[in-house]
Amino acid sequence: MCFKKYPEQGHLILCRGNAEIQFWQAPSEEEAKTIAMQSSCYIRVTNITELYKEFKSNGAPFGYELTEQSWGMKEMQVNEPYGNAIRFGEEIA
């Protein structure tokens, strides 16, 4: 897992395995809240139970915890400070 922070550019990079997510700081808190109300991200993963345990032990702010959905996915949602919904899912085998 990697964590790269570039405060002078308002940029953050999170990596895990081959996946990388990049975040940019909005020009203002108001704009950040407006953008967050209109966006979300869905990431398909493997071993979601282990990822959930890791997030839980690190105090992640869950929108909802690990749940088996009727559409055949195990999912969880983590909310970043401005409300962006970052959902993680794994197909139920």
Image (tube, rainbow, N blue to C red):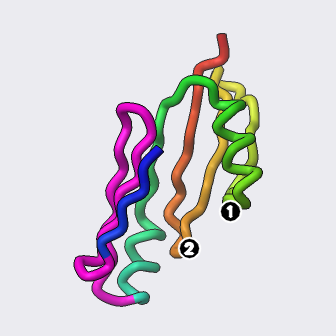
The three-letter code of the residue at mark 1 reads: Pro
Q: Which residue is mark 1?
A: 61
Residue lying farthest to the left in this orientation: 9
The location of residue 47, given as percent across then percent down, is 62, 25
- Residue closer to the observer: 58 or 83: 58
Side (left or right) of 7 relative to 46: left
What is the secondary structure assignment of the residue under circle 1? loop
| Contact check, label 2 and label 1, Cβ < 8 Å | yes
The answer to whether residue 10 is magenta is: yes
Position in image of residue 41 (x %, y %): 44, 49
Three-letter amino acid code of the residue under disc 2: Pro
- Along the horizontal axis of the image, is 9 left or right of 55? left
Q: Nearer the viewer, residue 12 or 65?
A: 12
Q: Residue at x 67, y 29 (%)?
A: 74
Q: Label 2, label 1: how many angstroms apart (C-alpha)?
A: 9 Å
Q: Is 57 on the left or on the right of 36, as rendered?
A: right
* Mark before the other along the chain sequence, 2 or 1: 1
Based on the displayed image, in which of its 4 quarters is residue 19 positioned? Answer: top left
Say which residue appears at 64% left-offset and 30% top-offset: 48
The residue segment tinted magenta is 7-28
* Residue identifier under label 2: 81
Q: Quadrant of the C terminus?
A: top right
Q: Position of residue 88 (x, y in %)?
A: 56, 40
**Secondary structure category for the residue under label 2:** loop
Tell me the quarter of the picture where residue 81 sits: bottom right
Give the answer, above or below, for where 82 lies relative to 58.
Answer: below
Image quadrant assignment for residue 17 = top left
Pointer 1: residues within 10 angstroms few (<14), some, or many (20+)? some
